Amino acid sequence: MEEKTMVNDILDNTKTELTTYQGVISETENMQLRQTLQQLRNNCESFQYELFKVAQTKGYYQPAQSATQTEIDTIKTELQQ
């Protein structure tokens, strides 16, 4: 398996982990467990971002074009209504 495929697979799996953490955290009443899960999620987010930067540097990942200010303002207005 080539490196690009492995990096993209890991990024996809990490996104799934983050979604799972969010669901579990929101349903956890025990504060100590909740804080532990939040720390694990934070570590996972940091790992994901570092791997994303590596993937972007190596050309494995090309982010979508940035939204224009007009597009941002339009969405903002729609969400505030």
Image (spheres, rainbow, N blue to C red):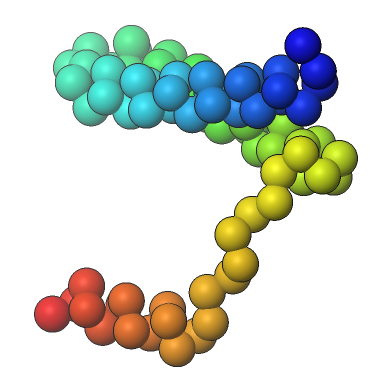
Toward which corner of the image does residue 75 lie, by quadrant? bottom left
Residue at the image position 37 percent from the left and 21 percent from the top: 21
Q: State which quarter of the image contains the N terminus.
A: top right
View extreme (right): residue: 58
Tell me, yes or no, if residue 57 can be seen here. Answer: yes
Q: Give the side of residue 79 with respect to residue 54, left or right.
A: left
Depth check: give the residue in front, 51 or 24. 51
View extreme (bottom): residue: 70
Please state the horizontal and vertical placement of residue 47, each as a whole percent of the image. Answer: 66, 27
Q: Give the side of residue 2 with respect to residue 25, left or right.
A: right
Please state the horizontal and vertical placement of residue 2, each as a whole percent of the image. Answer: 81, 18
Residue 41 vs 70, above or below: the answer is above
View extreme (left): residue: 81
Q: Give the side of residue 74 with respect to residue 51, left or right.
A: left
Residue 1 vs 19, above or below: the answer is above
Tell me, yes or no, if residue 35 can be seen here. Answer: no
Q: State which quarter of the image contains the C terminus.
A: bottom left
